[in-house]
Amino acid sequence: MNLHDLRPAPNSRTKAKRLGQGIGSGTGKTSGKGNKGHKARTGGGVRPGFEGGQMPLVRRTPKRGFNNARFARTYQIVNVGSIEDKFEAGQEVTPDTLMRAGLISGASLPVKVLAKGDLLKALTVRANAFSKGAEEKIKAVGGKAEVI
């Protein structure tokens, strides 16, 4: 099979409905919008979330208390076991090297190392945060856990 052999599945691509093409087309004159009214006008129709004049759900629900979502710090998570798989003994592990190894998506967000998995190599790991277990595992094999 080559690129020029590719075709969409049968009946998966339908032609656009052509509105206002005469009385015989079935969608002529008013173009399927009926006669007059708000929804027949240009730009007519209600906004998303409009509930016909009833008090909208978002305004009916109580909003009380504190939510930490605005202030929460989101970390990219890396486990000790995946560091063990991707790096050799004595290497320095930084957000840049983790990104090149494919363990994190970008070096812009902070990185946190967690304790899942086993570590058998002595490594110098530099990250924004460590769990207690991860720090203990890194130090147990003679490595360093440095907060940046």
Image (cartoon, rainbow, N blue to C red):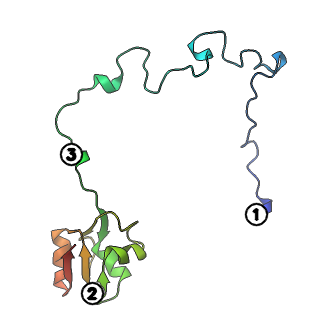
Left or right of residue 44, residue 97 in this image: left
Image quadrant assignment for residue 31: top right
- Distance CA(mark 2)–CA(mark 1): 47 Å
Q: Which residue is mark 1?
A: 3
Q: How many marks?
A: 3
Disc 1 marks which amino acid?
Leu
Q: Which mark is residue 121?
A: 2
Question: Where residue 144 sits: x, y (%)?
Answer: 19, 82
Q: Residues within 10 Å of mark 2 (few under 14, many from 20)?
A: some
Q: Earlier in the sequence, mark 1 or mark 3?
A: 1
Q: Which residue is mark 3?
A: 68
Image quadrant assignment for residue 55: top left
Please state, as top left, top right, bottom left or bottom right, where the N terminus lies in the image.
bottom right
Question: Where residue 115 sits: x, y (%)?
Answer: 23, 71
Label 2 sits on a secondary structure element that is loop
Label 3 sits on a secondary structure element that is helix
Question: Where residue 47 sits: x, y (%)?
Answer: 48, 24
